């Protein structure tokens, strides 16, 4: 059903107001802390049941030093150096994590580590071998242990997981990632065109990533009304992190890529010319698990008679809200983007993009996002689009594992 222009604007304005209200409320909470602190809400759930499979646990005395707590409470299983005790000693068949492995440990956040320490491995779809420490450690002690785990990766060049903010619909994130993302966009008045992208992202080295984008779509023919599909213009890009400062909470990356003319011009699925893309990507962490993402850059076609040079810029404001003890997270976001063909007299096209991402699995490695791209200018010639994507973080595990969370002793 078509979305009238004034309703679309009211919808966007209303959602923006809600998002800003949520952000303002969360910033104002008295016990709110920075994302980089890895703090949990003080209203943590308490319980009495403890997983009986691990060794018997004893309450830790009032010690706030994360290293000492880890040494006295955690090292029997995780090893004195955090690399994991040998199987011959612990007797577990389940592999233990190696916190000294920067590739595996650096993408994790202190918030996630603290949640697993507090409520046990099953809360995030991990093994029941990891017990809950909520009755043995205070919230401050749990946070200190989570902060200590961060120090076991000795190379500070690895960007911290706090910079891996939720993926926005209209702005690419600056953090290098191992992900597979399937996106879809369709016009609201009538499905005259459906544009999809299958994106493969592979991290390599400390701060770099390769990205392959395979677009495909369906276009309705003006005469018969049937849909015709085909491949779009594929692209290959490299991303590198230049700044990742835990002190300021800022990450800045650069992306450069080439777009090859694999799409069908007759179906309006391609431009017919090779093009080069150069972008700056970034994010600024804000209090209470909120963030601002930004992107700006240009597309430079080889044959200007087939496609003009163009510029793109945009920003997204969002926050992450944890719902319950099973680590279900919701991320409402509102973005504003601008595009302009770099030719004389070309107008600037402004759009707003309200959106919501939610984790589907307890492991949080499969996430769904829905939203809309609503024109703010040239609305008589441009239609709103419905947006959606399904994301799989391949580094966290197979897509079918870690879906069900379980929190023994938690009050659900």
Image: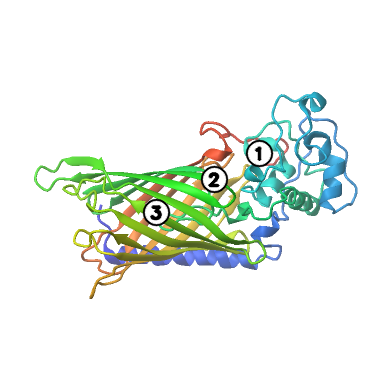
Front disc: 1 or 3: 3
Q: Which residue is mark 3?
A: 257
Q: Percent from the top left, x then y, of residue 165?
A: 55, 55
Q: Look at the image and tell me in which quarter the C terminus lies.
A: top right
Q: Which residue is mark 2?
A: 204
Task: Provide the secondary structure element on which disc 2 rests.
Answer: strand
Say whether residue 393 is left or right of residue 324: left
Q: Residue furthest front?
A: 302
User: Which quarter of the figure has residue 307?
Assistant: bottom left
Along the line of sight, the residue nearer the viewer: 14 or 96? 96
Q: Are marks 2 and 1 in contact (CB under 8 Å)?
A: no
Report, in whole angstroms, how far the alpha carbon at label 2 lies from the one at label 3.
16 Å
Residue under the image location 77 percent in, 51 percent down: 148
Q: Percent from the top left, x then y, of residue 348?
A: 30, 71
Task: Provide the secondary structure element on which disc 3 rests.
Answer: strand
* Residue 289 in sight in this render: yes
Q: Which residue is mark 1?
A: 123
Residue under the image location 89 percent in, 51 percent down: 62
Front disc: 2 or 1: 2
């Amino acid at each position: 059903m078509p979305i009238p222009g004034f309703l679309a604007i009211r919808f966007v304005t209303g959602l923006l107001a809600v998002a800003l209200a949520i952000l303002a409320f969360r910033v104002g909470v008295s016990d709110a802390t920075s994302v980089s602190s890895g703090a949990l809400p003080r209203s943590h759930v308490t319980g009495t049941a403890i997983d009986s499979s691990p060794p018997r646990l004893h309450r830790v005395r009032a010690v706030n030093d994360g290293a000492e707590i880890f040494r006295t409470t955690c090292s029997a299983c995780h090893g004195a150096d955090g690399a994991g005790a040998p199987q011959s000693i612990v007797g577990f068949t389940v592999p233990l994590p190696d916190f000294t492995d920067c590739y595996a440990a650096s993408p994790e956040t202190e918030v996630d580590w603290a949640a697993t320490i507090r409520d046990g491995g099953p809360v995030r779809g991990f093994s029941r071998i990891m017990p809950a420490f909520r009755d043995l450690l205070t919230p401050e002690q749990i946070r200190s242990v989570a902060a200590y785990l961060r120090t076991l990766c000795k190379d500070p060049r690895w960007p911290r997981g706090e910079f891996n903010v939720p993926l926005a619909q209209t702005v690419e994130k600056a953090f290098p990632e191992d992900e597979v993302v399937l996106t879809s966009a369709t016009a609201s008045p009538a499905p005259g065109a459906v544009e999809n992208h299958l994106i493969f992202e592979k991290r390599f080295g400390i701060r770099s990533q390769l990205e392959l984008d395979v677009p495909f779509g369906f276009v309705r023919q003006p005469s018969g009304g049937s849909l015709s599909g085909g491949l779009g213009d594929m692209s290959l890009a490299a991303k590198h992190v230049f700044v990742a400062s835990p002190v300021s909470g800022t990450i800045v990356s650069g992306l450069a890529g080439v777009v090859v003319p694999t799409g069908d011009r007759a179906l309006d699925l391609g431009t017919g010319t090779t093009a080069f893309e150069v972008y700056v990507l970034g994010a600024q962490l804000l209090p209470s698990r909120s963030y601002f993402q930004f992107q700006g850059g240009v597309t430079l076609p080889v044959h200007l008679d087939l496609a003009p040079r163009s510029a793109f810029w945009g920003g997204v404001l969002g926050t992450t809200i944890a719902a319950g003890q099973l680590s279900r997270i919701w991320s409402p976001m509102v973005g504003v983007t601008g595009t302009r063909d770099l030719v004389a007299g070309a107008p600037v096209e402004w759009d707003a993009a309200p959106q919501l991402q939610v984790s589907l699995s307890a492991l949080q490695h499969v996430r769904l996002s829905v939203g809309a791209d609503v024109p703010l200018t040239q609305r008589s010639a441009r239609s709103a689009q419905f947006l959606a994507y399904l994301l799989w973080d391949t580094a966290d595990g197979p897509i079918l594992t870690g879906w069900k969370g379980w929190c023994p002793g938690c009050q659900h």
